[in-house]
Amino acid sequence: MSEKAPVTPYDDADVSKKGQVTRMFDKIAPYYDNLNRVLSLGIDVLWRKKAISLLKKESPKTILDIATGTADLAIEAARVIRPDKIIGMDISPNMLKIGEEKIIKRGLSDVIKLELGDSENLSYDTNSFDAVMAAFGVRNFENLEKGLSEMYRVLRPGGTIMVLEFSKPRHFPLKQLFNVYFKYILPVIGKVRSKDEKAYKYLYESVQVFPDYEDFIGILHKLGFTQSNYKVLSAGICTIYLARK
């Protein structure tokens, strides 16, 4: 049986998923934060707060924020955890530009450094960080296991990985409501607000194929992570995964 083609934002067979994701986020970057608040009814802010509150228990001093986007997760970590250093890395220059403006505005430039990079080919040394985290980013990896393996590599022994990602609600009626909203309503709002309907159509499709809950934990174990667990948020719309190296 042939391997299924990855879900991509655009129907462009000549451009890799990684290239299409970069193009998508560069295009919607000016609208990204406001759209997140509108589309999630502001709940995405609470999700990040909860994720960082769980990571705080590990007291990491050095943190790598994979697919940092406009740096919301990194900023929350700097505010709550108060580590010595956070590196936020992303493949989209336009997202990083907006993130940099937010960091400067909050006076966090001495703690957070943003860098352009590829999550599946990290430039950092092995065993470099006390914690590696990602919010709504690993779903966009071209090769999920390769990206997670890189997160494992740069994490120090005993360190913690934290992944915050969309998941599929399992129970009636939220499961049905979730599918209707994400599949039909969200792309229309995205088209009106960002002029890119396909970006938000991709969001639904990428969530549908993402290995969530026990399946994601299974992948973490396969790659060498231990003490893996997950916490379901908002009845399954979003999930926090934690594991150790």
Image: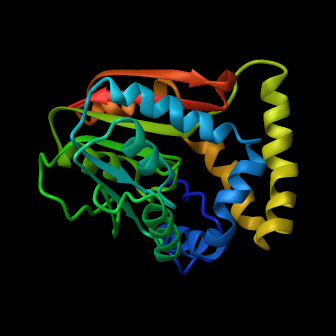
Residue drawn where x is 26% and y is 42% of the image = 83
Total numbered circles: 0
Residue 124's image quarter? bottom left
Residue drawn where x is 75% and y is 71% of the image = 196
Q: In the shown orientation, is residue 180 left or right of residue 125?
A: right
Where's residue 8, x and y in %? 60, 63
**Residue 61 visible, this angle:** yes
**In the picture shown, does residue 67 fall above or below 237?**
below
Residue drawn where x is 80% and y is 25% of the image = 174
Where's residue 154, x and y in %? 19, 49
Q: In the shown orientation, is residue 88 left or right of residue 31?
A: left
Where's residue 206, x and y in %? 62, 50
**In the picture shown, does residue 204 fall above or below 29?**
above
**In the picture shown, does residue 17 fall above or below 151?**
below
Where's residue 126, x and y in %? 12, 51
Residue 177's image quarter? top right
**Residue 211 visible, this angle:** no
